[in-house]
Image: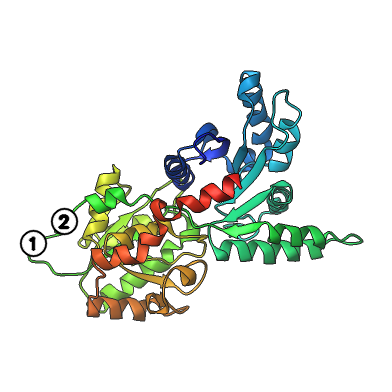
Amino acid sequence: MIDNKRVLVVEPYYGGSHQAFLNGLLDTLQCQSVLVTLPARKWKMRMQVAAPWVVSQVRSMEKNQRWFDSVLCSTFVDVAVLRAMLTQLPGWNPEARFCTYFHENQFAYPGQLKDPSIFQFTSINFNTALVSDCLAFNSHFNLNSFLELSRKFLKKMSEISIIEHHRAIAEKSVVLYPGIDFSTIDQTAAGEVQEGDNSPVIVWNHRWEHDKNPDEFFTALWRIKERGHKFKLIVLGQSFKNQPQCFSWAKDVFAKEIVHFGYADSKQQYGELLGQGDIVVSTSIHEFFGISVLEAVRAGCRPLLPNRLSYPELFEPAFLYAEDNLVAELEKVIVEGDRLGRELGRRYTDQYSWNNIGGDYGNWLFG
């Protein structure tokens, strides 16, 4: 029973998938929780100085409220600083278990520009892993890339070796896929794109940023159009002030094909739009898990994904395309029209619902 356990949840980047993850986790576990969060922006500053701010928030609590069984952190907090400062507070539980969930790791995050300061953020990730009691990664790709690249990082040091600490990190690490709340998608009915139009509907539902590689997607789509294939297009995902220029180009070039282009106004609209899709495509050069793809598959879309990153551990080879082979594979899928449908979509995604994996998190978080 964990309903009498208290957990301090620290998330300096409370938004998007991080927020959805915590909402689903805490709803599932039903333990006593206290959230200390900051809005999802300025991630570099969060990693560097959020920890002292979190301590000030805990210090403002009544002394008898500072007792927690566990502390759950994301990698946007420097857990080494946080743990050192919290243990000095009167009323703090010296046996509190510090658990860090790696949604991502800075060693494997592809920057748009070469950033000489990146080592300070990889170092924060590494030190966080050192001082945490237990670590969970959202995919084997995430865990393996962290271990491999941090090991290379350590080899750059001269005159000292701390490889035994690296082994200790590996021993206390597990993979826990993030739970997904599919309820809205399950409740929304698939709609008709256009009466009498049987053109397949292609979905792209990722963040509008360079690491999702939208240029390759829209270029492939243009080549498909040049070959005379008919299709409809739904483009979803969060956009930002500085977005890749290809989105403006695509909105003009595919004006006749577009069903929807932009962020969905609500979860219900998002579910309804996914339900209209036939094919969901990813061209990502960065993906530590792939929630958006699984959401589209849940709605019945047939996935077409690169054979890299986390995708090979989530889907069988039939849904993966080789490097530089996207156009040929997309053309094949369009011609065959093999939409999964909702029943098969649920079979592929049920294992990632909170109902099926919530118990694993309880064991990890409280031991």
Q: Seen from this angle, which residue lies furthest right?
A: 159
Front residue of this view, candidates 306 and 243: 306
Pointer 1: what residue? 195
Instruction: Give the residue at x 71% y 50%.
Output: 117
Per the image, label 2 sits on a secondary structure element best described as loop
**For discs 2 and 1, the disc positioned in front in the rendered view:** 2
- Say above or below: 169 vs 308: above
21 to the left or right of 156: left
Q: Residues within 10 Å of mark 2 (few under 14, many from 20)?
A: few
Pointer 2: what residue? 191
Q: Amino acid at mark 1?
A: Glu
Q: Position of residue 187 (x, y in %)?
A: 23, 50
Mark 2–mark 1 Cα distance, whole angstroms, equals 10 Å
220 to the left or right of 65: left
Q: Amino acid at mark 2?
A: Gly
Front residue of this view, candidates 238 and 242: 238
Q: Position of residue 186 (x, y in %)?
A: 26, 53
The number of numbered discs placed on residues in the rendered structure image is: 2
5 to the left or right of 250: right
Q: Position of residue 137 (x, y in %)?
A: 57, 56
Per the image, label 1 sits on a secondary structure element best described as loop
- Say above or below: 60 vs 18: above
Front residue of this view, candidates 26 and 22: 26
Front residue of this view, candidates 24 and 247: 24
- Confirm whether residue 41 shows in the render: no
> In which quarter of the view is residue 276 placed?
bottom left
> Disc 2, disc 1: CB below 8 Å?
no
Q: Seen from this angle, which residue lies furthest left?
A: 196
Instruction: Give the residue at x 42% y 62%.
Output: 214
